[in-house]
Amino acid sequence: ARAGWRVEGFDLDATAPARFAGHAPADLADRVRVNVVDLATAPPLPACGLVHASFALPYVGQAAFPAVWVRVVEALRPGGWFVGQLFGVNDSFNDGSGDEAFLNAAEAAALFDGWRVHRWAEEDADGPSFDGSKHWHVFHVVAQRPDSPAR
């Protein structure tokens, strides 16, 4: 927002706007908005140059993930950037419930076919979480959408 960007956040938690309001400087309030919405059922996202989806997309669930991904790609302008994480199939959260979305390496990579991938790191190791230790299988991605739509 300080660099002149309009920033829109999306969170399922109804307390998110109030929690965020205390962190945004008053002079930038008109450039920042937090929306309470379930990404799994959200309408089309606004056109943008950057989607920063830090550990967010997997939580839309396995069934909703394909449609949410389409909305993310459609929102990104040509040349726009995606920064975020996707869960891999070896993640200990993968209990078969469908509550989170899990992809194997080929499925995750296929999402970025034709994109310029600036960073691709696969983490498949034990590590800390909010609830203690767990096994993480995460694809960390920084990628740029092609300048022109695919034909």
Image: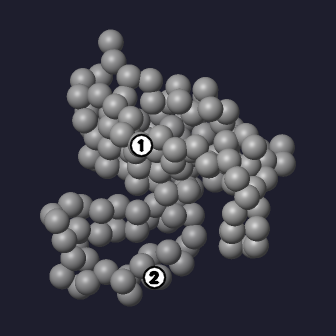
* Residue 120 percent location from the top left of the image: 47, 40
Give the image's coloring scheme: one colour
The one of 104 and 46 positioned closer to us in this rendering = 104
Q: Position of residue 8 (x, y in %)?
A: 35, 61
Which residue is more in the foreground, 74 or 80? 80
Identity of the residue drawn at 15% across and 64% down: 4
Residue at x 38% of width, y 87% of height: 22
Mark 2 or mark 1, earlier in chain: 2
**Picture quadrant where residue 144 is located:** top left
Q: Is residue 149 left or right of residue 9?
A: left
Q: Is residue 64 left or right of residue 144?
A: right
The structure residue drawn at horizontal position 67% and vertical position 42%, both measured from the top left corner, is 88
Task: Give the residue type that dot 2 points to.
Answer: Ala
Residue 119 marker: 1
Residue found at the very far left of the displayed protein: 4
Label 1: state its secondary structure. strand
Q: Are marks 2 and 1 in contact (CB under 8 Å)?
A: no
Give the image quarter of residue 105: top right
How far from the left and from the top, in percent, is residue 126? Answer: 73, 58
